[in-house]
Image (cartoon, grey):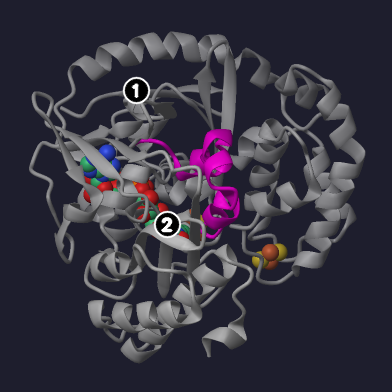
Amino acid sequence: MPKTIRFILNDRDMQTSLPPGMVVLDFLRRDQRLTGTKEGCREGDCGACMVLLGELDGDDVRYQALNSCLLPLGDVRAKHLVSIEGLNHPGLNPIQQSIVDEGASQCGFCTPGFVVSLTGFFMDSRDMHIQEAVDEVAGNICRCTGYTSIRRAIASLIEQYAVKLKGFKDRIKSLVDLRFLPSYFLGIAPRLKHLKEMQAEAEAEEKPVLLVAGGTDLFVQKPDVILNEDIKFISSRKELSGINLSHNLCTIGCATPIEDLKNSPLLQKMFPRMSDNIGLIASAPIRRRATVGGNIVNASPIGDMIIFFLALDASLTISNGKNVRRVALKDFYKGYKDLDLHEGEILEYLSFPLPAEASLFNFEKVSRRRHLDIASVNSALYIQKQDGTIDHARLSAGGVAPVPLFLRRTSEYLSGKEITPAIIKEAVRRAGQEISPISDVRGTAAYKRLLLGQLIYAHFMTLFPGIKVEDLI
Ligand SMILES: Cc1cc2nc3c(=O)[nH]c(=O)nc-3n(C[C@H](O)[C@H](O)[C@H](O)COP(=O)(O)OP(=O)(O)OC[C@H]3O[C@@H](n4cnc5c(N)ncnc54)[C@H](O)[C@@H]3O)c2cc1C
Ligand code: FES
Ligand code: FES
């Protein structure tokens, strides 16, 4: 019998027995006839379908803007789902008004998505910089107005409200006072607490079959299949989310959203370019759902997090509920989408040794479009050095083999060598012998081979600014 999913939709208490694998976009438009949320790509690429999802965080509710086309209904259980209709007042709210004032909407198809994303920004942003607001709408596509007027609308909102909102302690209350949000938002927290208790009973009955983490791969690849599956939502395993340091290891729960890695002060200290590197993965709403574990199990040969962690000698903690085992990430991939993961097993944690003091790390990604695109080829290099010599090197690359590749032989070659242009060129030659790229929509085999060489050069020029491009050609 289908289980009841209880949540709040805008101001209404909801319960439904629709399949937990149905995406929220279909629930809103087809079941609830709330058609303000638009359907564009259904692949997380256009932002027309944005909704807000609020979840209890202590006594407060924390809201995030997410793509409803990839958000399963089962994952809104005991949460507050807000569609564009739930943001409406009798008159226009300040975001809508600013869009009108700046002429930032023509056909209007993208406008609800922009309004929802920007509302999420004002609910969550601490610093309220214009660039942060612009990044927030990076996943919203407008096909007819043009982005200049949208940017003007955002700039005007920041100018009018950033200082006011930063001054208030209770963000939701101040957004209600400033008419960004309707007043029913003030009563959501106690209603969610009640729902949470009911959810605990429902979970006890669960019989897991298909694991869904963020769903950003699953709901693009096979939404129709998932609709009829029994689903286990990894988001309910809070202990699998978070980043910790202990015993010389950094441990990341596999349910940790990629956006949390981008914002982690711990990781930023170890990898100063981490935020920029992860900024090249999808858009903020996708990164808020996409998990580290999902990236690893999806096993795309160009999975960015996999390539990042392969060069850090990461290992995985895998459990079937009774037994726990550890597998090195570089041994996890046996062939194209063939993993060392058995039925009933779940990836719990990824851990890697803390980088040594005299170490350097670099990640590079080339895609057909700089932002919001998957890689043609990506690569990471970790170097532990002693004076001018490489004590230890680890090189990884994606898009150049059926699996995300740890380039063992090239890494071994570099270890113990002095850093000179001749050694780097030889490393590129050897890397070329370890890879087996194929031609596909992301480029020809020859192009990908060339790209990997360029990325290895880029690693060294970034990590050792004394090395110039003319030394390498
Ligand atoms: C618009 C868009 C842009 C994207 N851009 C990028 C990009 O730039 N770079 C990139 O690398 N990826 C990108 N992706 C792919 C995707 O977002 C990532 O691979 C993401 O990390 C997948 O995580 P998820 O939690 O959403 O996985 P899900 O879709 O929930 O799951 C993927 C697979 O992993 C399994 N699984 C998930 N967690 C676990 C676990 N803990 N243990 C065992 N099995 C598990 C699931 O059962 C499923 O088989 C993009 C996706 C979209 C939609
Ligand atoms: S419909 Fe395009 S992102 Fe959801
Ligand atoms: S206003 Fe037409 S797509 Fe943006």
Q: Position of residue 387 (x, y in %)?
A: 51, 57
Q: Amino acid at mark 2?
A: Tyr
Question: Quick one: label 1, few (<14), some, or many (20+) residues within 10 Å?
Answer: few
Helix, strand or loop status at disc 2? strand
Is residue 320 found left or right of 412 in the rendered image? Answer: left
Q: Is residue 170 above or below residue 141?
A: above
Is residue 56 found left or right of 219 in the rendered image? Answer: right
Dot label at residue 239: 1
Confirm whether the magenta stretch covers residue 210: no
> How far is the residue under mark 1 from the one under mark 2?
29 Å
Q: Is residue 331 above or below residue 188?
A: below
Q: From this viewpoint, which residue is outermost toward the front?
A: 387
417, 13: nearer the viewer:
417
Residue at 17% from the left image edge and 66% from the top image edge: 336
Residue 40 in sight here: no
Q: Position of residue 329 (x, y in %)?
A: 24, 50
Confirm whether the magenta stretch covers residue 258: yes
Q: Is residue 394 above or below residue 4?
A: below
191, 286: nearer the viewer:
286
Range covered by the magenta-colored residues: 255-282
Dot label at residue 382: 2
